[in-house]
Image: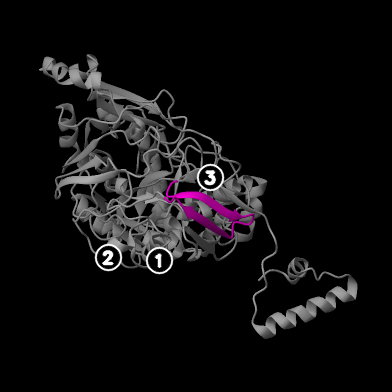
Amino acid sequence: MESRERLCRASGLARKGKSMKKTLFILGVIVFALGLSAPAYSQKVFKEHAIAMKGEPKYGLDFKHFDYVNPDAPKGGTVVIGAMGSFDSLNPFILKGQTAAGVGALFETLLTSSLDEPFTEYGLLAETIEWPEDRSWVAFTLRPQARWHDGRPVTVEDVIWSFETLKAKGHPFYQQYYKDVANAEKVGDRKVKFTFSGGPNPELPLITGQLQVLPKHYWQDRDFEATTLDPPVGSGPYRIKGLNPGKSITYELDPNYWGRNLKVNVGQDNFAVIRYDYYRDIAILREAFKAGAIDFFSENMAKEWATGYNIPAVQQGVMIKREIPHENPQGMQAFVFNTRKDIFKDRRVREGIGYAFDFEWSNKNLFYSAYKRSTSFFSNSELATSGLPSQEELKILSKYRGRIPKEVFTKEYSPPKTDGSGEIRANLRAALSLLSEAGWKVVDGKLTHTGTGKKMSFEILLDSSDFERIALPFTKNLERLGIEAKVNTVDTAQYQNRVDNFDFDIVTKSWQQSLSPGNEQRDFWGSHAADTPGSMNLVGIKDPVVDELIDLIITAPDRDSLVHRTRSLDRVLLWGHYVIPQWHISIYRVAYWDKFASPKIRPNYALGLNTWWIDTAKETTLEGRKRALR
């Protein structure tokens, strides 16, 4: 309820002195007696084509297209992309099943993000967005021409059904992400209003605009919580052309796509056909690409990038090897401790084990010195911490003294370092000291708990054999500490099932961050998410301090406060030693057969493959150029 003073001003009842106090008292009694809610004070309501998290949108109402597209890009051609593992579902909105690659192209959201702004969204299914100054609600007016693939119009009822169904039956992520979206209601033939609960949350209008809208008429007689291989109805630019379950799936550009000429779509979605072929092993997928069975490949292995492309196809320009810089925050990739396991509950144990990972040796001998060590959960951004806390951060953190590690206030976080020679005796001595403090001693060559007599052993779970060359040297160092660590590589379906259900000791995980962190942090680190299968809180953090810091980030009123609050959370997470940081790189490493063209201007915050197109002149000669290599 608004303050009574505001209520009086809005009602024209403000008085001075005793008269005002009397009026306030009487009005309060009336409101209480009648069970009325005080009306909101008058505030400006914005109605726009776009909304920015901070500041103003880059593109005005009269923009023709985004800067990073070619508005004259031709549409046509076929692209084959490799995918790992398998798939058994075309429903990407639930926890169950392995979803087919690319299926997101069938569906659309109310708003869509530009790729050259930190966090600004423009109307997609919605033609206008309305919100008040305090961003306590948002309303979207749907475009009258928006259509499902079966020709039926996209309606407000579809939007409301989607919101309610995703929160109730969808992947657990939706419950956290839309936790503070209280309700959705129809307020016009094409207008839907979402009202928010809780404290100030300025990003809620934008993340509500990210709502995936699904056709109520298609799903209402189907089991939404079940996997399916029946091609679903969507409203997006692509439809499913064919599929071979678990092996390949093909999409075709819908010739009747309703949104082809929207300003936000001009110059995008240019491939007529996109096929994803599945492979069980990344090495086989890579070789299939080099053999010409795949058109485009994103390389994630530094060794392969350094040595694996010295081939005639690249040397003669038939295959393009390209490094593309970007400005994306890199978040955190790390070995992740499952603190639900008793052996990892002690922070000193987690810190001690971290001394056994020799990043410098790995970077030098395995990665050709390509990577930077990650020292933040918000790497490669202004949100990352450095040095000691600033005065602004201390104002936030001081209230938690005694409840967070004292190092937060006294030390700059830095993972253990080595000289890269592989000799890490000093690190192992530091590790044993920490483990000893936590009650672990080496007995007959095995690290043993002095209280229980239990020997320390755990599993490092992987889903790719390529990562074994990083994990196995780590286990050798752990063995020198008396720890038995086994590497277990399983198929992607088993891996995902075990991770979703927190059935692991240590895994490798990457948390991608944006320049505007907010509600997703609840799913990453929030207490409720720790007990929710499928959440991204793999660590199992259940800390009221972390919950409060997340709420502070969500309610940040301006950019400066967002930065300081995010850095404060970063420090608490880092000194919790919940993970062993790995590495990051600020470029895309891509290779592709010479049949593509791309816009002259690149987007800042994405690769932008959907803005590329097939160069028909290059494609016509490509097969001949490939044959000449044999």
Q: Residue at x 36, y 65 (%)?
A: 165
Residue 573 percent across, percent down from the top left: 48, 52
Specify whether residue 489 is in view: no
Q: Quadrant of the C terminus?
A: top left
The label shown at residue 225 is: 2
| Circles 2 and 1: CB atoms closer than 8 Å | no
Q: Residue at x 15, y 36 (%)?
A: 284
Left or right, residue 373 beside residue 229: right
Secondary structure of the residue carrying numbered label 2: loop
Q: Secondary structure at mark 1?
A: helix
Q: Is residue 584 rendered to the left or right of residue 414?
A: left
- Residue 345: horizontal and vertical position, in percent? 40, 61
Q: Residues within 10 Å of mark 2 (few under 14, many from 20)?
A: some
Q: Secondary structure at mark 3?
A: strand
Front-most of 411 and 148?
A: 148
Residue at 32% x, 68% y is 452
* Alpha carbon separation for disc pair 2 and 1: 13 Å
User: Residue 325 vs residue 388: left or right?
Assistant: left
